[in-house]
């Protein structure tokens, strides 16, 4: 039963176009306010019209009885007979008899004469007569007439002898039946106008909602596909507004996610391969040495390879750990003032023999004056080692690696250049991105340069790479010089 009611409710919402969450929220949040405001406006119109028309009838009755009573008081209150005769003549010749009923009352409130001829001899049971006689002024009554059982409005004014004693009164009565009928017509028109306005608002806004809900649902389906792993798909939507900007942003995000996914897959594959290679070498030579302990030359050669591959593996693990620390915000610099030349020389010396074994030489141009920086010397040395290693790794086509340090303006500049194959122009903008290896065939996980760039950036410096394909690559590291303010 509950499922049937729920299904019926959904069908009803669908018929009025409210199945969409945005449409339903618009109808509940926006239209409810509009409807309440329109109903309030209609109610105010009804109240105003009722007050205005009732007040008009009341003013007309009060003016009529006030004018008539004053005329009686001035000209026909000398004797009862004058009052009696003029009252009879007035009711018989009352010009407004088609709209009002004029009554002449005696001092007890009984109707002596009536312009309608129906209420003569009848005592109206309304309180305005007693109030008018008691207060000496015009009083009104709105309610139902006991004789005719219709809704009426009446006004009564007293008439006095010239001596000041009450002689009777003048009373005008107007039926409110026609007025109430006119007011009901106004109420119906107000309700009809409210309904028409609501229909027009819903109709006009439906086009706007359609222009919003349609693209949003399309974008939602697109986002679900991306969530499902369909990276690289594009959202074909031509909108020259904020939705168009959102579509363009989502397309860029999809393309970026596709590129990152490919890069990460390549990274995982590369890391797996890079880890497997030294581990295979270490395991293989360990088994070889274990079976040939009586051959010192073979054992020495095996241990040398094991040590080399262990250092390589350790360097790769350190790169991964540094990358993890930087991404997680956990890397902290241990900064101090020091001469950059010493740590750069250590890095050059470390790779001198290694590069000679590869048939390359390293040329170091060391300045005579100290180059003082305020930095983490271990991290900077790590940067120098990594870039020199890359120069040797990817610059094998050349015969040398050049390293130079100097001061330019207020900065320390370290340049490391190789004369190898270089980097293709289309790949150069991406070489500092995480996991990017491009078309290079050398070993590595593709995060070394990214880590170096982040470390230099944490020191307030820059790492720039220039390369001409076929001629070599130059890496320029710029760091701010140390400013010693203690002497000041």
Image: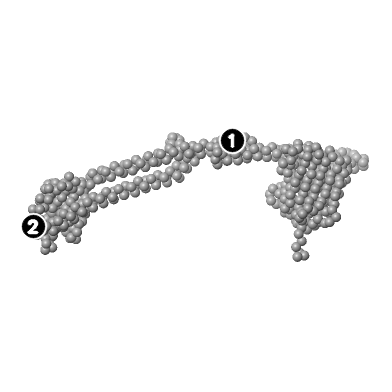
Which residue appears farthest toward the bottom when viewing the image? 488
Q: Secondary structure at mark 1?
A: loop
Q: Nearer the viewer, residue 97 or 14?
A: 97
Instruction: Look at discs 2 and 1 and give the one toward the viewer.
Output: 2
Q: Earlier in the sequence, mark 2 or mark 1?
A: 2
Q: Quadrant of the C terminus?
A: bottom right
Callout 2: 10 Å neighbours few (<14), some, many (20+)?
Answer: some
Q: Is residue 126 left or right of residue 250?
A: left
Q: Quadrant of the N terminus?
A: top left
Quarter of the image holding residue 361?
A: top right
Q: Dot 2 corresponds to which residue?
A: 80
- Mark seen at residue 235: 1
User: Residue 62: x percent and y percent?
Assistant: 21, 54
The residue shown at (18%, 50%) is: 173
Note whether 430 is above or below 455 in the view shown: above
The residue shown at (83%, 41%) is: 419
């Amino acid at each position: 039963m509950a499922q049937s009611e729920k299904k019926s409710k959904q069908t009803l919402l669908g018929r009025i176009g409210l199945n969409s969450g945005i449409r339903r929220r618009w109808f509940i949040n926006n239209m409810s306010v509009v409807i309440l405001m329109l109903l309030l406006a209609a109610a105010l119109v009804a109240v105003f019209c009722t007050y205005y028309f009732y007040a008009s009838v009341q003013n007309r009755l009060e003016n009529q009885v006030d004018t008539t009573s004053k005329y009686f008081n001035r000209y026909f209150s000398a004797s009862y007979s004058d009052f009696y005769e003029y009252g009879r003549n007035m009711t018989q010749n009352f010009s407004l008899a088609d709209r009002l009923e004029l009554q002449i009352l005696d001092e007890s409130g009984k109707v002596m004469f009536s312009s309608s001829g129906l209420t003569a001899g009848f005592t109206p049971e309304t309180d305005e007569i007693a109030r008018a006689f008691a207060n000496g002024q015009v009083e009104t009554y709105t309610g139902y007439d006991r004789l005719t059982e219709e809704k009426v409005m009446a006004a009564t004014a007293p008439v006095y002898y010239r001596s000041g004693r009450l002689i009777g009164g003048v009373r005008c009565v107007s039926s409110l039946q026609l007025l109430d009928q006119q007011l009901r017509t106004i109420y119906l028109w107000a309700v009809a106008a409210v309904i028409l306005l609501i229909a027009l608002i819903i109709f006009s806004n439906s086009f706007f909602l359609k222009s919003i809900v349609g693209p949003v649902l399309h974008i939602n389906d697109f986002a679900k596909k991306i969530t499902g792993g369909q990276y690289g798909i594009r959202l074909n939507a031509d909108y020259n507004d904020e939705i168009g900007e959102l579509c363009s942003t989502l397309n860029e995000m999809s393309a970026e996610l596709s590129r990152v996914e490919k890069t990460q897959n390549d990274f995982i594959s590369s890391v797996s391969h890079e880890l497997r290679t030294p581990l295979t070498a270490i395991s293989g030579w360990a088994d070889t040495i274990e079976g040939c302990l009586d051959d010192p030359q073979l054992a020495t050669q095996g241990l040398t390879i094991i040590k080399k591959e262990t250092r390589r593996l350790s360097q790769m693990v350190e790169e991964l750990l540094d990358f993890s620390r930087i991404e997680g915000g956990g890397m902290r610099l241990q900064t101090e003032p020091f001469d950059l030349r010493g740590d750069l020389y250590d890095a050059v010396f470390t790779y001198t023999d290694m590069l000679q074994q590869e048939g390359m030489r390293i040329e170091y141009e060391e300045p005579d004056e100290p180059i003082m920086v305020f930095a983490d010397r271990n991290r900077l040395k790590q940067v120098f080692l990594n870039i020199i290693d890359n120069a040797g790794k990817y610059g094998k086509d050349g015969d040398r690696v050049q390293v130079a340090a100097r001061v330019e303006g207020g900065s320390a500049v370290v340049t490391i250049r190789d004369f190898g194959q270089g980097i293709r122009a289309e790949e150069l903008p991406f070489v500092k991105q995480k996991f990017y290896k491009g078309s290079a065939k050398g070993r590595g996980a593709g995060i070394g340069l990214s880590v170096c760039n982040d470390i230099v950036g944490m020191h307030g410096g820059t790492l720039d790479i220039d390369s001409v394909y076929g001629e070599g690559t130059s890496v320029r590291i710029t760091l701010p010089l140390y400013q010693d303010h203690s002497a000041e």
